[in-house]
Image (cartoon, rainbow, N blue to C red):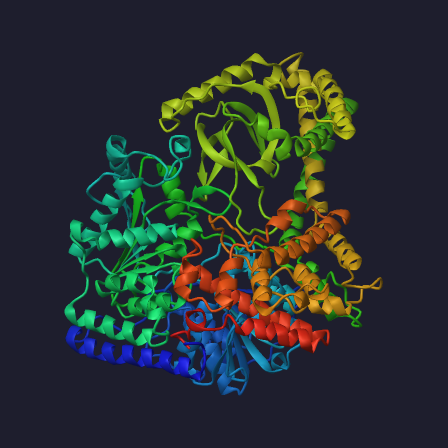
Amino acid sequence: MEATAEGLAKAAATREALKKKKRELELIEDGPPSKKPTGAAPSAVCTHEVACPKGFDPSSITLDPELYGTLEDPQWKGKPAKEYPFVLDSFQAKAVACVERKENVLVAAHTSAGKTAIAEYAIAKAFAMGQRVFYTSPIKALSNQKFRELSEEFGDVGLMTGDVSINPNAACIVMTTEILRSMIYRGSELLRETAWIVFDEVHYMQDRERGVIWEETIIFAPKDARMVFLSATLSNATEFADWVASVHQSPCHVVYTEFRPTPLRHFAFPSGGDGLYLVMNEFGEFRDDNFQKLQKVLGKGGDGGQEGKGKRGGGGGGGKPTGASAAQDLRKIVMLIKERKLDPVIVFSFSRRECESNAMLMAKADLGALDFNTQEEKETVDAVFQSALQCLSEKDRDLRAVAHIYPLLRCGIGIHHSGLLPIIKEVVEILFQEQLIKCLFATETFAMGLNMPARTVVFTAMRKWDGQEERWMGSGEYIQMSGRAGRRGKDDRGMTIMMMNNSMDEATCKAIIKGKANPLLSSFRLSYYTLLNLMRRVEGSGASMEYVIQHSFSQFQHEKELPALEARLEEVQAAVAAIGDAGEETAAEYTRLKTRLAELESTLAAEVRKPERCLHYLRPGRLVRVVQEGVDWGWGVVVSAMREERGNAPPAAAPAYHMDTLLCCAGVVGGEPTPALLDDERGSMEVIPVPLGLLHALSTLRISIPQDLRPPEARRAVLQTLKALRGRYPGGALPLLHPVDDMGIEDTGVAAAAAEREEVAAALTANPISKAERGEGEASLMAPLREKARLMAEAESLAARMRASQLTSFRDEARHRGAVLRKLGYVDGEGVVTLKGRVACEINTADELLATELMLNGTFNALDRHQLVAMVSCLVQVEKSNEQIRLKESLARPLQALQDAARRIAEVSVECRLEVKVDEYVESFWPFLMDVIYAWSKGASFAEICEMTDLFEGSIVRATRRLDELMSELERAALAVGDAGLAAKIAESRDTIRRDIMFAASLYI
C-alpha cells in the first residue's frame, strides 16, 4: 500500500493495535508499581559555557536577571512553557533557561541522557509565542519517527522529506537537513516565520559525504531564528559554539555533560573462553589485573585471526574471533544473558550478513532454539506483525524477507540493518521499544536516532572496515554504541561485553573504552550544486561567492589555530636570533637543501605511485617508505597490494588501491596506530592498510617475509631485518628505485626531477651540519648550527601552515570548478547563472551536471518511459553488487549515451585543472540497478526483481525511493526551463515505479 490516505490509515491502525496489545500486556506483566524513586533528579554534573562574537556587548541584553539569570549563568524562574512528569536534570534545566533567553544552545550529552527534552521545550516555547519551529534530522527514517513522536505530543506537526510531505504549513515541521538547505537556497517564505531550528544529531556534520549540508544550512540559517543543537558528547563543543556565535553574531551556549543516567560496566569475553572479565567498572576504573588474566586465557586459546583476511592480515590484529569459534562464543554469551536475565540485549556487528547469520544461529532448532517471549508476548507480536502486513499487497506479504523474520520475532529475536525492508525495520523498532524483542542483532546505524536502550550491549568485533581501511573502533564510536546499554529508571547499571581475541592489547583497549569523545571536524567541500546555488543567491546582492567558504567551520578552525602558530613562530625566531650569525650561510644552505630535497621527493613520489607505474613493484617483501600528512612512518614492508572495492563512489573518493604494509607502530591513540622509530622499545611491526596515495618512495630492496604473520615473533624477525639493513647504508638511507633507469618512466619532467634530486642529495651529504648529524666531524662545533638549521626549518613549516588557509585552497578549487561551469554553459562570462545552470540548481540527489546534460542534450526525449527511469537509476548511488551485468540492447544504448556525457564532463574537468580521473568518473555511474528498475517499471513483482540481484531487499527499496526523489527533481527542472512536455514524460515515467512495497506507508506516519 502506497503512502496514500488508505495506506496511512492502515499504518495508523497498526500503531493502534500495538497500543491496545501493550495495555493488555502491561496488566499481565507489570504487577505492583515500581518502588524506584521518581521525584528527585539524579546528580548530573554539567558544564556551562557561553561563546560570544567578537565585540559583543553583554550590556545590550535587556533581560531581567531576576527572571532569566545572566549570560554567564542562565536561570529560568518564570512559568515553564512545558511541564515534565519528572524533575529536570541540571543540564536540562540550564539548557531550558537558554531557550527562555532566546539564545542559541548546543546540548552535548550521552545517549539516553534526555537531550530530546530540550528540543521539546523549544517547540513548546515557539507554540506559546505563536511562532514556527523546524526540527531537522540526518535521515528520513529518523524524521519519520520524530514526526510521529512530536505529533502525539504537540498535534500541529508536519513532515517534509524527499518523498513525503504531510501538513507542510504546520507550526512545527520535521524535515531532513537537506530539505532545509533546499528551502534556504530557494528563499522559502516559511523561513521568515521561523523562530527556532532544532538540529538533531548535529555531530553528523563530520560525515565525509554529507557533512557539508549542515555547515551550509547553519551558515545561511535565518539571522532572526535561534538554534538548538543536539549532539553526542564532543571534545570540542566550545569550538563549535564559538563558530556559531561568529557566524550569527549572537551568543551560543554550551551545555555539556558526561553524566550517564545509568552507569556502565565493561566486560570482555575471550575467544574460546567460558566467562566474562570486568575490564572497567562503573566508576571508570580500568581493571589491569583482570585484563592480565584475560590475556593469559587468550594466550592459550585465542586464535588472533581476522575474518576474511587469512594468515596474511594477522599482524594487524583482527579484534575478533573467526568462523565457527565466533559463532559458538556468541551463542554462549547470549545464553548467559538470557539465563541471568540481562536482556534486552543489542548485539552490534559491522556486517549486515553477520547480523542475519547470528540471529538465525540463535533460532537453530538442532542447537536448541532460544525463545525469549511468553505466550502472551507472542500473541502481541502476532497482532502487531499481521496489522503491519495490511500495509502491503497480498503478493508482497508472502515475500521471503517477510516470512524469514516472522519466526524470529515471535521468539523475541530481531534484526536491524540498512538492508531490511523499511516496513520490517519499523516493526522491529516498534517491538524493541515495547520490549517484545529481547535480543536484537544490529549494525552501528541503530545507535543513531530515537532513544531505544537495552540493558546489555555486545560487540562481536572491535575492528571495522570504514570504506577505506580496516581499523580499530574509535572511542567516539564505542561511546555512541555502548551508550545504548542501561535503561534509565529500569536498570541500576548497564553492561557492555566485548568479544575479544589476542590481537587486542591493553593500550588499545584503554584507548577505546576510556578515550574521549571525538572532536567535531569540518567536512566542508565544494559541489557544483553548492556553487550554482551560491552564485544564484548572491546575484545582484553585491555579496561574494566566497562568503560561505570564509564562514565555514573549516576556515574557522584554521583561523583559531593562528594565534598559537604565531606565538610559536615568534619563539622560534627569537631562538634563531639568540644563536647568532655564526655559520649563517651553512645553516641557511642546509635548510634550503633539506626543503628542496623534500619538494623533489614529493614530486617524484606523485609520479612513482601512479598505479600503472608502481603496482608491478609492490610485491611481497618490497621495502617502501610511507608518509601521511607530513608524518613520516619510515620504511615498511609490503605484504600485498590490491584494488579497493569502491562501489559507486564519487571521483573524489579515496585511492583505488591500497597496500597491506608492515610498519613499526608505538601503540594506538584514539583507536588509531601511531608510528615509531625502528629503535623505539615500544615499537612493533603491525600490518596496516595503507592507501597508495601515502607511498613516498620505493626501495630497490626486497626481503623474505614469513608466510604467517600472526605470531609476534614472526613480525619481530622482520623488524630485526629492517634494523640490520638500515645499518648497512650511511645514515640509514636505503637505495631507491630510479624512476627512469629502474622503472623506465619516459617523462622529461620526471627525469629532470630525478637528476636534480641526486645533485641536491649529494650537496646535502657534503654539508657540515649533515655530516655532524651522521657523527662525522666535530659534533660540538656543529651543535649550534644544527640547532639553528632545525629551528629555521620549523619556522618555515610554521609559516607555511599559517599561509595554507582553507580559504586559499577552496578559492583555487572554486576557480577551477567555475571554469568548468563556464565551459559547459552553466554560467556566463559575467558569472551569472544561465537557464542551464538553473536546471542544475534543482538537482540535489545525484550528479547535477550529468543529469542536466542528459536532460538538455535530448537523451531523455529519445527514450520511452521505462528506459528513462532505468537510465536515471544509474545516477543513484547504490552499494556494489557482485552480479554480472548483461544489458539488453534497449538499455545498452541509453547507458552508452550516459557514459559519453560523463566522459565529456570529466575531460572538461581535467582541462580546467581539476583532479578527476576520467575512467573512474565514468565507471562511478555503473548500472547495478538498471535492469532491475526496468523490469519493475514494466510491472514485474518485487519477488521477481529480487531474484535479479544480490542486493538486500531494503537496499533496493531505498535506492528506488531515492530514484523517485531524483525523478521529482528532474520534473521540476524540466518545468524550470519551460519544457512541459518533458516534465509530463518524466512524471509518467516516475509513476511506473511508485507502487506496492517500494512505497508502502511508514508505520510512523
For the point 26% across and 37% down, the residue is: 294
Q: Is residue 1003 left or right of residue 231?
A: left
The residue lying toward the viewer, choosing from 928 and 553, is: 928
Q: Where 801 sits versus 134, above or below?
A: above
Residue 956 relative to residue 710: left or right: right
Q: Nearer the viewer, residue 9 or 127?
A: 9
The residue drawn where x is 72% and y is 52% is 904
Q: Residue furthest front?
A: 889
Residue 843, position as x, y percentages in the image: 64, 66
Q: Could you tell me which residue is drawn at 20 percent across and 69 percent down?
A: 378
Which one is in front, 769 or 874?
874
Residue 820 drawn above or below residue 325: below
Percent x, y for residue 566? 69, 45
The residue at the far right in this view is: 829
- Left or right: 474 in relation to 358: right
> Is residue 60 visible in the rendered structure shown here?
no
User: Residue 307 lies in what quarter of the image?
Assistant: top left
Q: Residue at x 37, y 78 (%)?
A: 11
Along the line of sight, the residue nearer the viewer: 292 or 985: 985
> How many callouts does the rendering have?
0
- Examine the rendering and report whether any part of residue 784 can be seen: yes
In the picture shown, does residue 504 fall above or below 345?
Answer: above
Residue 697 place in picture, x, y as percent? 62, 27
Would residue 368 appear left or right of 715 to someone viewing this image?
A: left
Quadrant of the rendering where the C terminus is positioned: bottom left
- Hey, which quadrant is residue 727 in on the image? top right
Residue 539, quarter of picture: bottom right
Q: Quadrant of the N terminus?
A: bottom left
Q: Is residue 224 above or below residue 496?
A: below
The image position of residue 907, as x and y in percent, is 73, 49
